[in-house]
């Protein structure tokens, strides 16, 4: 058995390269799809960790037609509000 282990160790980088080429082909050709459970959990995690996004949703009024118009908003009230999230 030792001879086989030694041979595998000698070929380890080649085996890894072969596996990585296969993975790259699989992803490119078959469009590797994550299970929906994983996609949902990832999205939930991102939403939970996005404190700036939560601040904007909870404390800001969003309008698609709104522009800043070159006006600068004072940052202090925004930072205080963000710190309270």
Image (tube, rainbow, N blue to C red):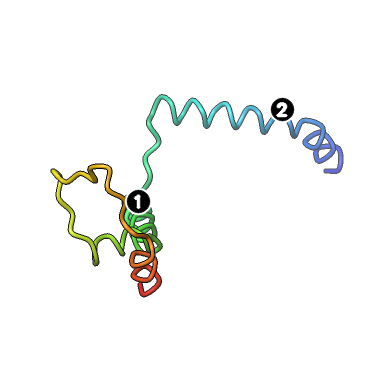
Provide the secondary structure element on which disc 1 rests.
helix
> For residue 22, what is the image quadrant?
top right
- First in sequence: mark 1 or mark 2? 2
Taking the view exactly as shown, the residue that stands out farthest to the bottom is 84
In this picture, residue 52 sits left or right of residue 66: right
Q: Residue at x 67, y 33 (%)?
A: 16
Provide the secondary structure element on which disc 2 rests.
helix
Please tell me how crowded label 1 is: few (under 14), some (14-19), or many (20+) other residues with Cα within 10 Å: few
Q: Position of residue 69 (x, y in %)?
A: 22, 42
CB-based contact (under 8 Å), mark 1 and mark 2: no
Above-or-below relation of 21 to 72 = above
From the viewer's side, name the closer residue of 31 and 79.
79
Q: Which residue is mark 1?
A: 39
Q: CA distance from mark 1 to mark 2?
A: 33 Å
Q: Which mark is residue 74?
A: none
Q: Residue at x 59, y 31 (%)?
A: 20
Please tell me how crowded label 2 is: few (under 14), some (14-19), or many (20+) other residues with Cα within 10 Å: few
Above-or-below relation of 29 to 34 = above
Q: Which residue is mark 2?
A: 14
Q: Position of residue 38 (x, y in %)?
A: 38, 53
> For residue 14, what is the image quadrant?
top right
Q: Residue at x 31, y 51 (%)?
A: 72
> For residue 81, what is the image quadrant?
bottom left
Q: Position of residue 60 (x, y in %)?
A: 22, 61
Which of labels 1 and 2 is toward the front? 1
User: Which quarter of the image is occupied by the N terminus?
Assistant: top right
Q: Residue at x 81, y 41 (%)?
A: 5
């Amino acid at each position: 058995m030792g001879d086989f282990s030694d041979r595998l160790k000698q070929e380890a980088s080649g085996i890894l390269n072969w596996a990585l080429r296969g993975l790259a082909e699989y992803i490119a050709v078959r469009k590797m799809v994550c299970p929906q459970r994983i996609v949902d959990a990832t999205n939930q995690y991102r939403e939970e960790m996005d404190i700036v996004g939560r601040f904007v949703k909870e404390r800001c009024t969003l309008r698609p037609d709104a522009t800043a118009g070159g006006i600068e908003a004072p940052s202090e009230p925004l930072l205080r509000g963000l710190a309270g999230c």
